[in-house]
Image: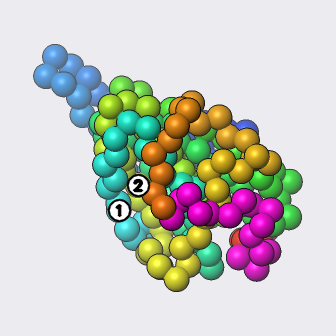
Amino acid sequence: MTLKVLPTSLPGVLTIEPDVFDDERGFFMEVYHAQKYRERGIDCTFVQDNHSFSRQGTLRGLHYQFPFSQSKLVWVVEGTVLDVAVDIRRGSPTFGQWVAEILSDENRRRFFLPRGFAHGFCVLSPTAHFMYKCDELYHPESDRGVNWSDPDIAIDWQINAPVLSPKDMRLPFLADIPPEFLPCYS
């Protein structure tokens, strides 16, 4: 087997299928291997790992940091989520477009989001353990977001009544975010 990196409809956002070695005892896989990722164009120095546990119907997002933007490598250890990336880079030809990937403990896929994308996920299974690596530390003063229900983006979250945090309920639509709080396309 070999680590597969698959492009999505948004340039830079990638789906990753890791090497998994299954046998009668279970499985083994590398969670991350810097050289293998670098050889496939993902050249980040990850500095923070996060673990989120959520119940079915929970929707987290759409989050981003600015000016301390983050690239993220995300995956699910247990459960199933719909993971979403939205291009929020001013001047990008794909500004406001989104792409999604089902991530689960069964398909073991990863999703890579470069800097300049808002990120969110919703839990489709009874519970989910969600992991992510970031190439920039969390900066509370740079914490920003886009409303999950923005009609101009029109994400199909595959759930009807998401469970949201008060913070996520109040996030602005993309069109209402001042340009100085959005990353630039370069």
Q: Is residue 49 magenta?
A: no
Q: Nearer the viewer, residue 140 or 48?
A: 140
**Residue 9 found in image quarter:** top right
- Compared with residue 100, is residue 63 higher up or lower down, i.e. above or below? below
**Picture coordinates of residue 140, whole percent (x, y):** 47, 79
Number of numbered discs overlaid on the protein picture: 2
Residue drawn at the location 82% of the way across and 59% of the way down: 92
Q: Nearer the viewer, residue 146 or 30?
A: 146
**Picture coordinates of residue 120, whole percent (x, y):** 54, 50
Q: Is residue 178 left or right of residue 120?
A: right
Q: Secondary structure at mark 1?
A: strand
Q: Which residue is mark 2?
A: 132
**Picture coordinates of residue 124, whole percent (x, y):** 43, 32
Residue drawn at the location 77% of the way across and 75% of the way down: 178
**Residue 19 found in image quarter:** top left
**Picture coordinates of residue 134, whole percent (x, y):** 45, 64
Instruction: Return the disc, 2 or 1, that comes first in the chain's sequence.
Output: 1
Q: Nearer the viewer, residue 78 or 15?
A: 78
Residue 49, labelled with which disc? 1
Q: Say which amino acid is labelled 1.
A: Asp
Residue situated furthest bottom in the rendering: 141
Task: Answer whether labels 2 and 1 touch (C-beta < 8 Å).
Answer: yes
Quadrant location, the N terminus: top left
Residue drawn at the location 45% of the way across and 45% of the way down: 163
**SS assignment for the magenta stretch, majority:** helix
Please report the bounds of the magenta region as a residue range. 167-181
- Compared with residue 153, is residue 65 higher up or lower down, i.e. above or below? below
- Compared with residue 97, is residue 71 higher up or lower down, i.e. above or below? below
Quadrant location, the C terminus: bottom right
Q: Say which amino acid is labelled 2.
A: Tyr
Q: Is residue 133 left or right of residue 112?
A: left
